[in-house]
């Protein structure tokens, strides 16, 4: 992963970092400062479920997973609803960035192992940096 | 249109979970050679942006709200398979961290919002662009097709959702399909506007980061046909 790191922190990548920085600032701004003012009306599916009389099917069902740390986009224990929503947005942005970058790195590492195996020449174990 | 637990019966969510898991595995295999210093951070920022934008419900007619979906945005910016994976990340995070969409319905939600609204809709868009055979580097045709197919992606996803509800015996198809497609054809307008504006901004700032622009006219799916460079 040395090559990747070198490329990422080279001068040539400066423009990319600026782009990413601006995009991240916009994203955090939306998640933290705009999301508390989003419409709280039911969404398309919820509304159809209410009107066509099948929303009860979800209300009666036991949730299959109840371990969500931030259910319904509101951080627990924060009294101000808008702050609770904004904080949940910040958490969500951090988690999605980490998960997506992690998945990309995983694919990158797996590919490197795969191509090295295919090349066949190198048998010595090399530590995989992460 | 995140489906909660209880709307789908086990055969339906079971089959869709298998289909989505299989597609995710295949996508990971497909993207492996594409991973470089540009796309890995782009995966992160695209996923985060879609997550954030999905929080912003906007009102549509009659006490209903809609929100951005982002599947077409992800595919246009990153290519079909990386775009699909970004949607999977967003949906999994929403389900596990925010209780948005049921765990049993996660496979169905991935199917509707990443396979149908992402892979399928993007494939149709690439097909359309090939048929129109616009010259490489024609930004305006990219934006026009992006607008139309991102609208279509939301409508198709809502139709898929309706079929799943009907197959599960939750509600008759003749009842749910017109209602779902009706409201989502309005929500889709918001989708088209947001997707097109974001793609236009990125095209202006960094055209090299828009996969559909770099690979204009190239089918995203043929085996090994993608430009590795």
Image (spheres, coloured by chain):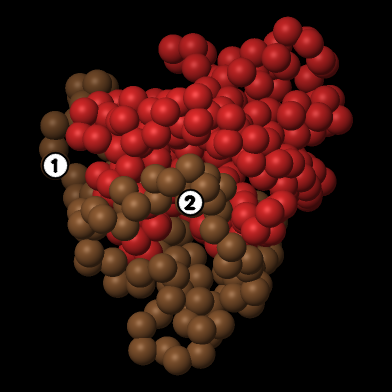
Chain colours: A brown, B red
Q: Which mark is residue A125?
A: 1
Position in image of residue B87 (x %, y %): 46, 43
Query: How much space separates mark 2 and mark 1, taking CA atoms?
Result: 59 Å
Position in image of residue B111 (x %, y %): 40, 32
Chain letter for mark 1, please.
A
Locate residue B137 relative to residue B118 in the image: left or right: right
Q: Quadrant of residue B13?
A: top left
Residue farthest along the bottom direction in this orientation: A79
Characterize the local packing of mark 2: few (<14), some (14-19) or many (20 or more) Cα atoms within 10 angstroms: few
Q: What is the secondary structure assignment of the residue under circle 2?
A: helix
Q: What is the secondary structure assignment of the residue under circle 1?
A: loop
Viewer-proximal residue among B52 and B189? B189
Mark 2 and mark 1 residues within 8 Å of each other at the beta carbon: no
Locate residue B145 relative to residue A10 in the image: left or right: right
Viewer-proximal residue among A39 and B82? A39
Chain letter for mark 2, please.
A
């Amino acid at each position: 992963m040395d090559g990747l790191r070198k490329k990422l922190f080279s001068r040539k990548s400066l423009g990319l970092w600026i782009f990413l920085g601006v995009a991240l600032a916009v994203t955090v701004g939306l998640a933290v400062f705009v999301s508390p003012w989003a419409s709280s009306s039911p969404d398309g599916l919820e509304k159809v479920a209410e009107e066509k009389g099948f929303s009860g099917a979800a209300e009666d069902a036991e949730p299959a997973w109840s371990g969500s740390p931030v259910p319904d986009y509101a951080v627990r224990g924060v009294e101000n609803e808008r702050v609770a929503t904004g904080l949940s947005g910040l958490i969500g942005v951090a988690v999605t960035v980490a998960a997506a970058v992690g998945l990309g790195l995983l694919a990158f590492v797996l590919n490197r192992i795969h191509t090295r195996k295919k090349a066949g020449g190198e048998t010595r174990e090399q530590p995989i940096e992460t | 249109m995140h489906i909660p637990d209880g709307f789908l019966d086990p055969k339906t969510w079971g089959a869709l979970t298998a289909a989505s898991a299989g597609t995710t595995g295949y996508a990971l295999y497909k993207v492996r050679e594409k991973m470089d210093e540009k796309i890995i951070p782009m995966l992160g920022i695209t996923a985060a942006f879609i997550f954030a934008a999905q929080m912003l419900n906007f009102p549509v007619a009659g006490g209903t709200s809609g929100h951005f979906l982002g599947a077409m945005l992800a595919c246009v910016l990153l290519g079909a398979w990386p775009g699909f994976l970004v949607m999977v990340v967003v949906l999994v995070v929403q389900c596990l961290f925010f209780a948005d969409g049921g765990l049993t319905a996660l496979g169905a939600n991935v199917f509707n919002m990443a396979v149908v609204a992402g892979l399928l809709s993007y494939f149709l868009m690439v097909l359309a662009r090939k048929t129109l055979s616009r010259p490489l580097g024609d930004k305006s045709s990219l934006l026009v097709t992006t607008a139309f197919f991102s609208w279509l992606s939301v409508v198709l996803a809502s139709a898929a959702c309706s079929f799943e509800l009907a197959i599960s015996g939750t509600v008759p198809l003749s009842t749910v399909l017109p209602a779902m497609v009706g409201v989502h054809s309005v929500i889709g307008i918001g989708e088209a506007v947001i997707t097109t504006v974001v793609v236009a901004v990125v095209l202006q700032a960094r055209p090299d980061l828009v996969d559909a622009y770099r690979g204009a006219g190239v089918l995203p799916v043929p085996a090994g046909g993608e430009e590795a460079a």
